[in-house]
Amino acid sequence: MEQSSKSSTHLNPFAFPSETDIRFLLLVLSIAGSTIILIQTLVGIFFESPLITIPFALIVTVSLFIVALYQTRQFASKTIRVNRWEDFPPAVNDPALSTSLQQMNCYIQQTIDNVPELTSTKIHLIWDETSKSSSKPDGQAFGFGRKQYVRLKKGLHDAFMQFPELPIFQSVLMHELGHIANRDASKTVLTKCLSRCFFPIAIFSLISFNLYTIWELGDRLIREISLNSARSGILEIVNINIKLIILLLIVEISRSSILRVREYSADARARNWLGTSTPIIKTFSEENSQENSAKFKIWTFLQKLFQLFRAKIAPNHPTNKQRIIRLKNPRYFFDLSHELALLAGFLSGVSLNSNLSILTISPNVVALIEKIYQEVRMASEPNLSVILAIVLFFGLAIVFLATFLAIFVIFGLIPIVGTVGLQIQQAAFADLAQPKQKRLLTLQKLITSSLTLGIGFILGCLLTPSTYALSIRTAEAGISWSGILGLVIGWTSIFLIWEMSIAKLAGSIYLNHIEPNTPRQKIRWLMIFSAILLLPLLLWMGNIQMFFGAQAVNPDLFDFSQLAIWSIISGVLAFIVFGIILFFVWVSASRKGWLKKPQCPKCQSIISNKSGLLKNCPVCHHPIANWAWLPLPISFPSPPPPESTFAMDSPPPL
């Protein structure tokens, strides 16, 4: 059995944003981007003008999030009311059972009071003896914001009766409290509500699009119009359908991944509080491992396919074997996830494409700006109308450029910086803090991560249903697969340079942070500057992809040799800007004192972390860098003596 003191030798993964937070960000962006694509595709059937399709798509997308947020706020109270759950402890007629439930409530409340991460959280306990699965020793954390609930099934009371001989009660309780401490209960509810709002809109859009297509084809046949001229259009519609279905699958995978990875974090939090993973692993070993959370009965072939999809591609719940592996290796939380890199790259490509469709209104904006400019030039003397025209001229130009830049930042940078960039920071810190452990950031892993990002981004561009600024047409446009391979290499190269720079900077900054509190300011600072650092390279490669894609569609549009020269010159400028930003970041970090060797806050001696992050000052033995290490286990209240508990199979008291 692991000793309590040993828990402090593990790095603290909760010092950084959790993987649940990272994947939730991707889900929000994927739903926003997919909704915009779907609505534009549907509305584009009736209105060709982007001045109509784009605002309509934005209105629907914003409305979706507003409705999902409203449902999230009502979720807890509605769920409790519909399922007829009660406050815990419930009122019962049996005095012995009432006493036992009171003891259970007292033990839970005392445990919550001993958890530092829950001191400012009010947790409501809910009793469930009405659901079909209420006899199982299980629980559920749910709620939103400050209203957090823990559902206690009737079977959990049976487990309490066998505690401490059997550890399942304590393991389940600490796991559910871990969800609340990790702040993922709110994200879980919001994830479910977003999915419930998104998928009906997506399916309605997809069905409506196909019904309109069938109606158009039927109308042609009724009027005896040949379908030969529409053959290319039919193939394009089939192509769009395939891409839209893939988009829906990606959103489902993003949704299920949030529900899956949050279990790992809750397990890790419970392990830390308990001081050992033995009770949790023992609980998993005794349970029947469930490969997925699908509860419905299999009656049709479609249901079988859906169950297979959920189990193999998008499971809501990890298997017990997967959870045990994570529990035995806490360092896993600092490792790179290639699945996450592929998903981030894909969603960045899709979201960036869907939102860059705003560029289709650029001719209208440019025409309006030119008209205002001509009126200003024709004015003989300045007056109020001329001044207003000048203000409008500059205002439109600035808004258009700011919108273009904001789209690149929100839908191009954030999915990458907020996911892969953050994981690079964590892994770089873990390597320097524990250099004797297996390295997480080798050159091979960085190359693989960058390549996965690049492939994911290009796949996102390829699978965008409509052709926008960054979309890649293959057979129709005549662009070769060697050209696509060149783009993958280009994206991989800029991602690799960016990742290496971030890894070097983050490792040094976090290793020198020996203060007791979490370096939240430094995490935010690094996130902002890593985004700024990637921006010039992203703009450069994005423009190359746009211009070469346009040249592939229309070879007469650009001269290939001039385009190549322009690409080289602009690339040199982009890397110069990249170097200037990187130099400024290093200078800024140095001026803040983040890169110099830290001093012990007690004896002021210089602390060298060349051999890894120290836990105590080598001179005065004062504790340092408490934030980097898992805290010691909590103290638990004494369980009630066996003779004071009520056995469920005993005869009722006289």
Image (cartoon, rainbow, N blue to C red):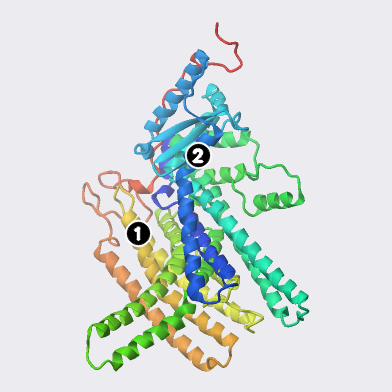
Q: Tell me if 229 is positioned left or right of 258 in this view.
A: right
Question: In this rendering, is residue 517 above or below 78?
Answer: below
Q: Quadrant of the C terminus?
A: top right
Alpha carbons under labels 1 and 2: distance apart: 37 Å
List x then y, in percent, for residue 229.
72, 83
Instruction: Please name the residue shown 50% across and 55% down the image.
Output: 23
* Residue sitting nearer the eye, 597 or 287: 287
View extreme (top): residue:
654
Number of marks in picture: 2
* Residue sitting nearer the eye, 317 or 202: 202
Q: Give the class, few, some or many, for how many residues have Cα within 10 Å of label 1's Cα (few <14, many ≥20).
A: few
Q: Which element type, helix, strand or loop, lies under badge 2?
A: helix
Identify the mark nearer the N-term, 1 or 2: 2
Residue type for callout 2: Lys
Residue type for callout 1: Arg
Instruction: Please name the residue shown 34% across and 91% down the image.
Output: 374
Instruction: Please name the residue shown 67% across and 72% down the image.
Output: 237
Q: Kindly check if marks 1 and 2 are in contact, taking CB atoms under 8 A apart as contact.
A: no
List x then y, in percent, for residue 398.
34, 77
- Residue 249 shows in this picture: no
Instruction: Please name the residue shown 57% across and 93% down the image.
Output: 556
**Circle 2 residue:** 78
List x then y, in percent, for residue 619.
26, 47
- Tell me the tag on residue 524: 1
Judged by depth in the image, the label closer to the viewer, 1 or 2, is 2
Q: Give the class, few, some or many, for how many residues have Cα within 10 Å of label 2's Cα (few <14, many ≥20).
A: few
- Residue 466 shows in this picture: yes
